[in-house]
Image (tube, rainbow, N blue to C red):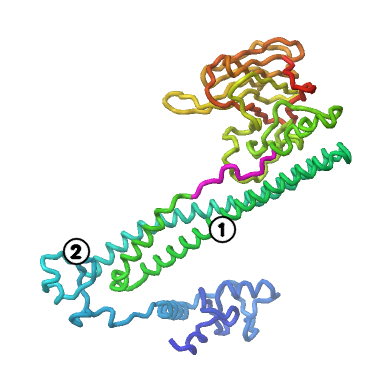
């Protein structure tokens, strides 16, 4: 159609081809959405062109104009085809058949030639349909892979932003602690800030490289999807002449490995903040404090809030955090930053009035009913009842009537013992016995807004377990 025809088929409001055109009483036509938006800003339903006021809130559809617009768009979007492409280059006959052995369109003369002796043939339209279906199946897998890469990039974008937030928050905590240590600790403070910034720069660059790589793959996948879709819309002959390249292009992209979460991408907050004052005890022993277990915020459920010194945790509003491999799969739980696979270790936890909690260790996988499950040994308090449970054992209620306020968790890895003790009475609550074979991490669970706090240990030239 001519440019004049396009002008006649354009809405006076949006100046684009009519979409669902309606006819006003004054005989002017507009897109349905355009005229409705126009009337929302007017006191009367007047024509945008001649200002004639119509009484109809829902003007009728201009069906004839709608059909013309659809024909125009169809002709405009119809790809131009060359008649010469439909003719055999050897015999100038129309390509009506497809040779299954040579995988190419041929004419009836080619069929009877020596080149195609005893070959199998299909009508051109049947062959095109079969091959379209073949590519369509691959295209669906390619689109799914594209979606995986887009999701991975979205999580990487969120992780990159979270790294910056973590770095700023960690820097703030470092500065606050160093401020209490006064001027002579300035060198130590600068050294730790530098380490943090170097890690931030390193991990931010790592995420930047990951994001750029994912963006490159997404662009390549998108280009392949777009090119394949264009091939599928082509004429049968053109499609069949190019389908080998299309199949190869799609299959090459399908060989890409699926995107994976980046392990260790987040800032190692525990390394920078954990036991910070203890590490400089030889410079200011009077103000040094040491906590035997430091909580790792990278393992915390998004519903948990961790204190700035990483020693207490409570339930709070759900946070928008990126997915990362370190985060525990158990809801409302958090792990210690350091795992134990040998020796004897103790840590004391202040329960206070928290009414919904669990304490213990989490670690090695255990075979249960033919399936591997994360091993957990824990004591918990809920509904005014104390219970112990282990993945390797069974659940057991404890006959405790006294409300526990402070509990000591003691792990003797080599002897295979995990015990819980009431610190106020120094009485044993329960002891698990198991042959541990893998690293165990301190484990805390709570759904209460009151915090569970790991108590500081006694500090001297050497650290002594107070058991």
Q: Residue at x 26, y 78 (%)?
A: 86
In terms of secondary structure, where does tag 1 sit?
A: helix
Q: Quadrant of the C terminus?
A: top right
Q: Quadrant of residue 450?
A: top right
Query: Closer to the observer: label 2 or label 1?
Result: 1
Q: Position of residue 213 (x, y in %)?
A: 53, 56
Vertical position of residue 144 compared to residue 69: above or below: above
| Disc 2 from disc 1: Cα separation | 43 Å
User: Callout 1: few (<14), some (14-19), or many (20+) C-alpha neighbours within 10 Å?
Assistant: few
Report if residue 267 lies within the magenta region: yes
Which residue lies under the disc numbered 1?
212
How many numbered circles does the render carry?
2
Report if residue 384 lies within the magenta region: no
Q: Position of residue 385 (x, y in %)?
A: 66, 17
Magenta residue span? 259-269
User: As drawn, is 235 to the left or to the right of 299?
Assistant: left
Which residue lies under the disc numbered 2?
101
User: As drawn, is 362 to the left or to the right of 309?
Assistant: left
In terms of secondary structure, where does tag 2 sit?
A: loop
Q: Quadrant of residue 390?
A: top right
Magenta: main secondary structure: loop
Q: Position of residue 74 (x, y in %)?
A: 41, 77
Q: Residue at x 23, y 66 (%)?
A: 103
Give the camera-side residue of 18 and 127: 127
Vertical position of residue 327 compared to residue 432: above or below: below
Q: Which mark is residue 31?
A: none
Q: Residue at x 41, y 67 (%)?
A: 227
User: As drawn, is 34 to the left or to the right of 75?
Assistant: right
Q: Position of residue 339 (x, y in %)?
A: 62, 28
Q: Residue at x 50, y 83 (%)?
A: 9
Query: Which residue, as the protein is rendered here, is positioned at the far right?
Result: 183
Q: Quadrant of residue 42?
A: bottom right
């Amino acid at each position: 159609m001519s440019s004049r025809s396009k002008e006649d088929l354009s809405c006076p409001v949006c100046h684009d081809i009519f979409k669902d055109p309606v006819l006003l009483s004054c005989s002017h036509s507009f897109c349905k959405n355009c005229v409705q938006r126009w009337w929302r800003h007017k006191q009367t339903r007047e024509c945008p062109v001649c200002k004639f006021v119509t009484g109809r809130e829902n003007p009728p559809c201009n069906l004839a104009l709608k059909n013309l617009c659809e024909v125009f768009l169809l002709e405009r979007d119809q790809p131009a085809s060359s008649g010469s492409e439909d003719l055999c280059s050897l015999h100038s006959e129309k390509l009506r058949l497809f040779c299954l052995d040579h995988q190419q369109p041929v004419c009836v003369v080619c069929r009877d030639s020596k080149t195609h002796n005893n070959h199998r043939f299909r009508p051109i339209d049947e062959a095109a349909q079969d091959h379209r279906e073949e590519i369509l199946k691959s295209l669906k897998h390619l689109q799914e892979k594209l979606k995986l890469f887009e999701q991975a990039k979205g999580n990487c974008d969120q992780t990159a932003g979270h790294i910056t937030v973590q770095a700023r928050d960690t820097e703030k905590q470092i500065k606050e602690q160093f401020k209490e240590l006064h001027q002579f600790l300035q060198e130590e403070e600068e050294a730790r800030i530098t380490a943090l910034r170097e890690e931030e720069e390193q991990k931010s660059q790592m995420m930047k490289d990951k994001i750029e790589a994912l963006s490159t793959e997404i662009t390549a996948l998108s280009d392949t999807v777009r090119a394949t879709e264009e091939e599928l819309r082509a004429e049968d002959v053109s499609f069949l002449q190019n389908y080998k390249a299309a199949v190869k292009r799609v299959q090459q992209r399908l060989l890409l490995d699926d995107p994976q979460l980046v392990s260790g991408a987040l800032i190692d907050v525990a390394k920078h903040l954990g036991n910070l004052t203890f590490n400089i005890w030889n410079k200011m022993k009077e103000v040094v404090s040491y906590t035997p277990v430091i909580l790792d915020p990278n393992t915390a459920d998004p519903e948990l809030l961790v204190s700035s010194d990483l020693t207490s945790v409570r339930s709070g509003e759900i946070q928008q955090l990126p997915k990362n491999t370190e985060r525990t799969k158990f809801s409302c739980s958090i792990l210690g930053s350091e795992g134990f696979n040998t020796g004897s270790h103790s840590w004391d936890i202040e329960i206070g009035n928290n009414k919904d909690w669990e304490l213990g260790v989490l670690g090695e996988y255990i075979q249960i009913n033919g399936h591997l499950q994360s091993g957990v040994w824990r004591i918990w308090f809920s509904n005014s009842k104390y219970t112990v449970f282990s993945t390797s054992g069974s659940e057991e209620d404890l006959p405790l009537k006294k409300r526990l306020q402070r509990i000591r968790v003691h792990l003797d890895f080599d002897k295979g013992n995990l015990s819980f003790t009431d610190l106020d009475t120094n009485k044993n609550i329960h002891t698990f016995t198991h042959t541990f074979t893998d690293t165990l991490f301190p484990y805390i669970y709570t759904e209460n807004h009151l915090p569970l706090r790991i108590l500081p240990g006694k500090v001297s030239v050497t650290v002594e377990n107070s058991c």
